[in-house]
Amino acid sequence: MNDSYRIALAGNPNTGKSTLFNALTGLKQHTGNWAGKTVSLAEGTLLHKGKNYRMIDLPGTYSIFSNSRDEEVARNYIVFEKPDVTLVVVDATSLERNLNLALQILEMTQNVIICINLMDEAEKRGISINERLLTRRLGVPVIKISARNKAGFPLLLDTIERLAEGKIKCEPARLTYDKDIEAKIASLEPLVADLVEDRISSRWVALRLLDGDESLLDELKSRLKVKEGTA
Amino acid sequence: MNSELAGSRGDLNALYERAQQLSSPDLRDKIVGSLYQESKRLCEAGVQHTKTKRDRRTEKLDAVFTSPIWGFPIMMVMLGIVFYLTIAGANIPSDMIARFFGWLENYIAAFFDWVKAPEWLYGVLVLGLYRGTTWVISVMLPPMAIFFPTFALLENYGYLPRVAFNMDRIFKKVGAHGKQSLTMAMGFGCNAAAMMSSRIIESPRERMLAILTNNFVPCNGRWGTLIVLASLFMAAGYTGGAKSLVTTSVIVGIVMFGILVTFLVSWVLSKTALKGVPTHYTLELPAYRRPKFWETVIRSSLERSWAVLLRAVKVAAPAGILTWVLANVNAGDTSVLMHIVNFLDPFGQMLGLDGYILMAFLIGLPANEIVLPILIMGYLSTGALTEVDNLGDLKQIFVDHGWTWLTALNMMLFSLLHFPCGTTLVNIYKETKSMKWTFLSFLIPTVIAIFVTFVIAQSVRLLG
């Protein structure tokens, strides 16, 4: 199983994330525990061109600031378990709100695909989305689908494959904050980089620490190479 | 895993401390602000709307319903309308149902006479069981059959999420989670169910606040008591439409008072036993839409009213029997019931209530629905009046036992503020797994109920 690629599914609640998960994995699902945590996530297998992909359905969240257990679980999986590809499912009918989460995830990890779901519903309401422009602006593939009708799946699956195998590279556009925050990040980032090396985005860790994310601090502590005594 | 980090805990702590020194209180707002701006920019560039009527309408309505100025007055008016419809509409059917059951009782009595049933069997089955349950039905069914569908319509039109949105601001100010507004709204239906819904609040501290204060909004079981007492005593000098209007304002006032207590208790707790800062969250406001009117009305009347009524009857039946038994089994020269009543009476009087009322609240612990029926049965068992055919007779029973508007007001307040029902307590224990917090969620409301009624009773008596 370890040679298969891992695809994580993230997204706001009510975006059809589970519909997509079910449509892609069919009945090949089970609930898997990971990393010794008590939290269980639904896991399924997707077969595409003779290759197996493990899909992990992360909890639906509106943000990923680790306010809640669900947000922590999603964050920890994306940052520390490092899936080969993270699919962010967004709702075409309320893209603006959904993009908040997508932008946050782009700060955390490299290989992201943004799936604009519920396109059928959006078209009915007269919403048209220029995914090429969004792809250019965001620096990651943006793909329109309708999980309900299984529309847009071939392109999605090909993109997953090419991204997982490194045939295409993502250059996620990083959000620039105001001068003050950027200066603070810049002064903190080298210190963070010493600790996390290149495993985690040091810019993101710096930002989270500035924001006072204690749950991330605890998580980092639990992943130190040098374990000290229980004291 | 390959995500192990170099360095030590000390390095991390030092790093975090450095970050905190650099940080500023408005940093989170700035980060979130930047995210929203970027999302907006992206959508302005990449999304086109060809028919946007719908969204505009939602935006316009939200500007009114969630406006800082108009939000609350509109909320009060909406609440008022719902109660007005409930109170004005329920009176007549309530009376009719009560008359019908009274009429039916004559035939049942005749039947018992005809089969020469023993006196005690007639007592248990008719005076206890039958009267207990029929009272619950005639008093509670009509208001519920109006209240639930109206409430469900408001919910389905998309208004209730806006109420939660308005409340959110205050909850944040008192140090509680904004989602507490949702669990509170749920409490208007059923506090026991609201305990389960408090799971949507992730932080244990804020969840505990929501659990401890949920009881201060009246649930289904208490609406009946509030509505009946308010319409019998609070608008005595008025008739017709004015009467319903006064009753409505009294109930809106009581509900507002309950919400105020919720805020006060949340605030005190978040400054003392449950200290902390509220966490940030996103509240999704769905678009307004016209619900399927009749489907909503029928479904909510059938499902909710029926379910609540069934539960009431299930609990009322044994409680009715218990009350009758207590009233008719003698210990010494008086009945067990009278012993309890006499024991509780001095304390009850201090609170502007009486021994019967306190006894009803105690026996009514399993479900608030049965407090009023038990009280009536308690009064009836002393033989003041044997038949209750309409709401006028009901008031006479109360008045004969020394009730004034003060008694009614304090009973309403006690009902609003007192300990949660048995089911709710069980759920609190299940959710918190802590005897301490379960006990506190019993104690805090009870102390407040006693305090408030005591202060009101004493000051009214002092002022004459």
Image (spheres, coloured by chain):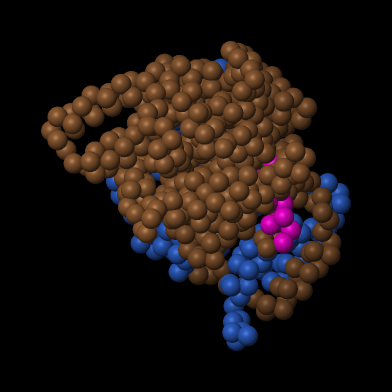
Chain colours: A blue, B brown
Residue at 71% across, 29% down: B72
Decide which of A217, B101 is in the foreground and name it: B101
Residue at 51% across, 45% down: B357
Q: Is residue B97 above or below residue B432?
A: above
Q: Which residues are magenta?
A: B260-272
Q: Residue furthest front?
A: B333
- Dominant secondary structure, magenta: helix
Would residue B34 appear left or right of A18 to someone viewing this image?
Answer: right
x, y percentage for residue A221?
63, 72
Decide which of A119, B329 is in the foreground and name it: B329
Q: Is residue B159 above or below residue A223?
A: above
- Residue A117 is at least partly visible in this image: no
Decide which of A225, A173 is in the foreground and name it: A225
- Residue B460 is at least partly visible in this image: yes
Q: Is residue B4 above or below residue B241?
A: below
x, y percentage for residue B339?
44, 55
Decide which of A186, B109 is in the foreground and name it: B109
x, y percentage for residue A26?
32, 43
Q: Is residue B269 magenta?
A: yes
Residue at 55% across, 43% down: B415
Disc tally is 0
Which of the 4 image quadrants contains residue A69?
bottom right
Q: Is residue B278 magenta?
A: no
x, y percentage for residue B333?
38, 55
- In the rendered image, the quadrant that contains the N terminus of chain A is bottom left
Would residue B318 appear left or right of A163 to someone viewing this image?
Answer: left
